[in-house]
Amino acid sequence: MQRANILAQSFSSITSYSAIRSLNRCALVVHCATPAKWKLPSAFPSGLRTPPISQPPSQPEAMRHASSSPNNAGVQNNGGSAKREPKTGLGSFATKALVAAATASTSYAAYYCATAFLFGSSVAIANGDVGGGGGGVGGRRFDEVTKTDENYGIEYAGFDSYPGIRLDDGTGVATKEFKAASAEVVSKALDAAGLDETGMMKGITTNGGDDITLHPKHAHRVGFGTCPLYGCPFLPMDVHYDEEVKAQLENMRKNSSNQDEKGGDSEDGKVRAMLKSSGSEKAATLTLVGYKGGRLEDQINQDRALALAPYLYRNISPSTSDGGESVSDSPADAGPVARLIGAFDGHAKYGERVSEYVTRTLPALLGSKLADRDATSSAEDDAGEADRRRRDHDVGKILRDTFLELDATSPAHPSGGCTASAVLQLGTRIYVANAGDSRSFVGVHVAPPPGRGGDKKAITAIVYGTREDKPHLSTERYRVEHMGGTVYLPNGFSDTGKGTTRVLYTDPTTGSTSGLAMSRSIGDWDAGAVGVIPDPLIDILDTNEIKKRVVAKLNEACNKDVEEVEIDPASGESSPSAAGCVTYTESDVKIFAISATDGLLDYLPVNAIANHVAKGLYDTAAAINEEGEGVDEKQTTHPLLVCEDLIYAAAQGWQDDKKGRYRDDIAIAVADLEIE
């Protein structure tokens, strides 16, 4: 089925998102109230046809984000003997959304899910200042801060891995010595994972070795089984410009909506095999290249993402660190479940090189450190509360060191950088590390208990989200200015909070002043010279704590809302009736994670994103066998399809707001975090 090519930036004649998809397929509708004077339609009139691709405007509007400009980062600095060089010098517009997704019937009827939640709309997001640095340098531990989700009272620990100005010895640029040491660490980690120094499978070559590709035939996934020791990563493919992928997604949607009512899957299994490199029923990632002006064929997607579910880092151990045989997706027997997802938004002229490097290198580098940590500890060592705190700080330091080493070894010369937002699950513990303005979220989906739910609706909510590292935040601004940098604030920002704040620095390739729209990133060495750092903010959640708090809140709320009373015949005393209540248990609560770049988040509310992702991960319908009996439930849609929906909805937001002159790259990764 054809789509309107909003991605070709040729929509001056198109007035409705209905041209993107016709009514005979699943659609995602997002109705947003925004200050930008655009609105996505609430219905899809039929009869519109896909327009031909035309040349986009020859003079595109100035880019929305300085971080997407080719002049945001700079060349490597030299000198110094410490870790860093010596000093040399939006959330979404929308407020609510309505999400529609196709049911499993052949009618493609849409059902709607409101984004308002039972306990309000506030989300536990670290979206402001944090403490002035946590140490972790040398033998010091990080200064841990306890945080609480406002909706459910979920408690979790967090810390800033940056040591603070009082302990820092320079700027955000690594010294030559640290770069050399980091390069050695990275090389050993890649070798231990069965990869060469470019992060590709050993013995596999591409055209000249210089290709950067997110195609299903990506070298990590050759043969759908030849993978690094840490497992087969799901990697994003372009939902629109890869014609084969677009056709496969259309077929998957059709087959998901027309499953054989007798329990068969028709050709759905074959379709899913074709898209195996980007997702499964429990994890997925997709992308869409943006438009920054010029010819369509010259556009470069600088966004990357990945999902490893499972994350078999334990295969990278001292016993197999000599670059052993590659493995399939079979989970390792030892240790609790592990998963890893992340989003990496490249910027500046060669940002795609940095984001690609991080995507290829992160799993091996992080995995080798985790495997080494496991080799020196045991399950008994992590049994007590003090032991768990020590483990959390060990993993936090591993994440911090991984980010710093990625920064020190990234191909950021002469100009390039990327954000890094990653979610690491180790058993019941969820570790989130973030540097930049990409973001990660942890959500819950509570389905009505089977046989006990009555007419209760499922509940989906975000319980945690990372902050955007923006230059105007007080601690970030103080660091930048202390290191000789300047923070640009748009006119009226102090009063309205509107506009994009930037770290100003001199671009060595042009000699002009450029601005980076974030205060932390991987690469961006010239901005690093004036205080932009790679050190991530790290938060630690526990799935048991999340489930316990959510269940307690739901059951408490239900009991408070009961109006009926029961009279004890013997005593005459009255008590609330439980007739209108559903008693939830922890098994009713499902936990999932989302990582996305700002190309998606700028135009979609996070609660609407969570609602739609939960549909792809958890919505099911009972299948019927040949005898007319119910059999195991099957998913009514697929995580890949909901990622596609969300990408197209965000792309429409860019189209309506920028009128085809600019659209940022978009990437998203999602994963179920349930422990079987």
Image (spheres, rainbow, N blue to C red):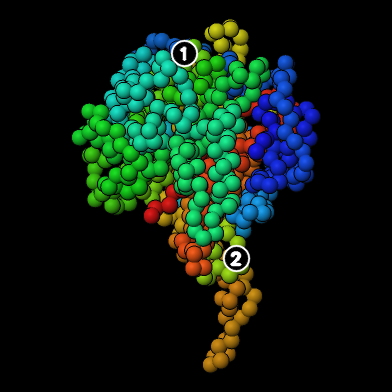
Secondary element under disc 2, as helix, strand or loop, is: loop
Q: Residue furthest bottom?
A: 570
Quarter residue 495 falls in = top right
- Whether residue 10 sits left or right of residue 180 in the image: it is right
Which residue appears farthest toward the left when viewing the image? 319
Is disc 2 in contact with disc 1, using a CB cutoff of under 8 Å? no
Q: Which residue lies under the disc numbered 2?
A: 456
**Inter-mark Cα distance, 2 to 1:** 56 Å
Q: Residue at x 44, y 29 (%)?
A: 217
Number of residues whose C-alpha sits closer than 10 Å to that of mark 1, classed few (under 14), some (14–19) or many (20 or more): many
Instruction: Say few, some or many: other residues with alpha carbon within 10 Å of mark 2 (under 14 / 14 to 19 / 20 or more).
Output: few
Q: In terms of sequence position, does the residue under pointer 2 or pointer 1 come before the other?
A: 1
In percent of width and height, residue 381 lies at: 25, 48
The three-letter code of the residue at mark 1 reads His
In this rendering, the label closer to the viewer, 2 or 1: 2
Closest to the observer, 170 or 626 = 626
**Is residue 660 visible in this depiction of the protein?**
no
Q: Secondary structure at mark 1?
A: loop
Looking at the image, can residue 571 be seen?
A: yes
Residue visible at 52% across and 54% down? 635
Mark 2 residue type: Lys
Residue 315's place in the image compared with 614, above or below, is: above
Question: Residue 615, how many percent across, how many down?
Answer: 56, 51
Find residue 577 and report its horizontal and vertical position in percent. 58, 78
The image's mark for residue 413 is 1
Q: Quadrant of the N terminus?
A: top right
